[in-house]
């Protein structure tokens, strides 16, 4: 799908192809890529590579002697349900082509609503391709920060239920979060060199204002990377803690069930002895049943008291 936008009063609004200053291709077909390549004189192979779901962050054609539009590839977080029903994050590529009068972007999958809303508005944005490109980079990296806030909220909620953990639910949840952090760590580590390269090239982002923008973008990237590292260490500790708590809680349950089994064994044994088809003591007394029942109750109570005293029950 091809979408056309122009910047009006600091916000992006839909428009026609001839008035567009931002052209966005979302999950484009081969025909749409070919049409955009012809219209904007872009390398079709690079556009096809940009729509690859596994494209890594990179940049190209940022030197003054390059005669083609500059290219920047970043990745943004995408929230989804995994195969066993737990929330986790993946990342998807977003490619920017810097042309003299417009910016063309390609995303392999639908951009999350939060990033899209930030890109189209929320801050005063410019129609100049370089400024708008920096705005998009900031929104993408800021969404990593938002994603990490959500991950940390999941960790806090998980912590509240650790005391009663007896199943593998928490372990599966930790696995999903750790998988998300691995994706984030890889993307952010590959993004930082790209941002540093943007600051030292002489073709784009050469004015002082752009340098401040780039610093702001790098601050977001650094903040997200720091949050990923801290949360990753916390989850490693939680993984060990949850395993220990699950094992300990199961041991407690088994201990209680064993104690209950011991208590219930007393009436079973007594009932088995007095239920034999042979003469037994007290067999001819009308009060024998109540006496045996009372004695059994006393023995069970004493057993329960002794097990409780030793913290087995």
Image: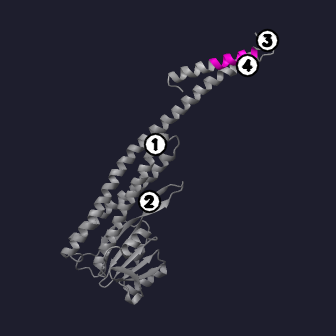
Quick check: 18 above or below 84?
below
Near-viewer residue (144 or 289): 289
Whether tag 2 and tag 4 are in contact, CB under 8 A, the answer is no
Of all residues, the one furthest to the left in this rendering is 208
Residue 144's x, y, as percent?
36, 62
Which residue shows up at 58% across the image and 26% down it? 259
Q: Distance between the Cα atoms at labels 1 and 2?
A: 23 Å
**Label 1: few (<14), some or many (≥20) within 10 Å?**
some
In this rendering, which labeled residue sits more in front, label 2 or label 3?
Answer: 3
Q: Distance between the Cα atoms at labels 3 and 4?
A: 19 Å
Tell me where residue 81 appears, x and y as whole percent: 51, 59
Name of the residue lying farthest toward the bottom: 18
Q: Which residue is mark 2?
A: 89
Q: Which residue is mark 4?
A: 272
For marks 1 and 3 on the same chain, the one whose residue lies earlier in the sequence: 1
Number of the label disc, if any, that sits on residue 162: 1
Part of the protein shown in magenta: 288-298
Q: Could you say which quadrant of the image residue 261 lies in?
A: top right
Q: Earlier in the sequence, mark 4 or mark 1?
A: 1
Is 291 inside the magenta-drawn segment? yes
Q: Secondary structure at mark 4?
A: helix
**Residue 160: image x %, image y %?**
44, 45
Pick whichever of labels 2 and 4 is earlier in the sequence. 2
User: Residue at label 3?
Assistant: 285
Helix, strand or loop under label 3: loop
Asked if residue 261 is positioned above or below residue 195 in the image, the reply reads: above
């Amino acid at each position: 799908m091809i979408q056309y936008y122009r910047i009006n009063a600091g916000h992006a609004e839909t428009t026609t192809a001839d008035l567009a200053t931002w052209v966005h291709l979302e999950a484009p077909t081969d025909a749409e890529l070919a049409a955009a390549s012809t219209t904007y004189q872009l390398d079709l192979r690079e556009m096809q590579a940009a729509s690859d779901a596994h494209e890594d962050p990179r940049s190209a054609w940022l030197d003054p002697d390059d005669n083609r539009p500059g290219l920047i590839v970043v990745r943004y977080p995408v929230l989804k349900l995994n195969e066993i029903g737990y929330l986790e994050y993946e990342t998807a590529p977003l490619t920017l082509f810097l042309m003299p009068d417009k910016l063309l972007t390609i995303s392999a999958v639908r951009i999350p609503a939060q990033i899209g809303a930030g890109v189209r508005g929320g801050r005063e944005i410019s129609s100049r391709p370089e400024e708008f490109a920096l705005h998009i980079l900031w929104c993408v990296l800021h969404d990593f920060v938002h994603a990490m806030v959500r991950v940390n909220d999941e960790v806090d909620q998980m912590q509240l239920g650790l005391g009663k953990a007896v199943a593998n639910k928490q372990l599966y949840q930790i696995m999903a979060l750790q998988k998300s952090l691995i994706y984030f760590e890889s993307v952010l580590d590959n993004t930082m060199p790209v941002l540093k390269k943007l600051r030292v090239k002489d073709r784009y982002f050469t004015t002082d204002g752009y340098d401040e923008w780039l610093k702001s973008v790098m601050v977001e990237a650094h903040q997200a990377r720091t949050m990923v590292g801290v949360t990753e260490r916390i989850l490693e500790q939680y993984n060990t803690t949850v395993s220990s708590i699950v094992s300990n809680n199961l041991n407690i349950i088994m201990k209680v069930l064993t104690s209950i089994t011991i208590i219930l064994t007393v009436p079973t044994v007594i009932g088995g002895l007095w239920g034999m088809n042979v003469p037994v003591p007290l067999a001819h007394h009308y009060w024998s049943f109540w006496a045996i029942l009372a004695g059994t109750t006393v023995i069970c109570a004493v057993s329960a008291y002794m097990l409780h005293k030793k913290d087995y029950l």
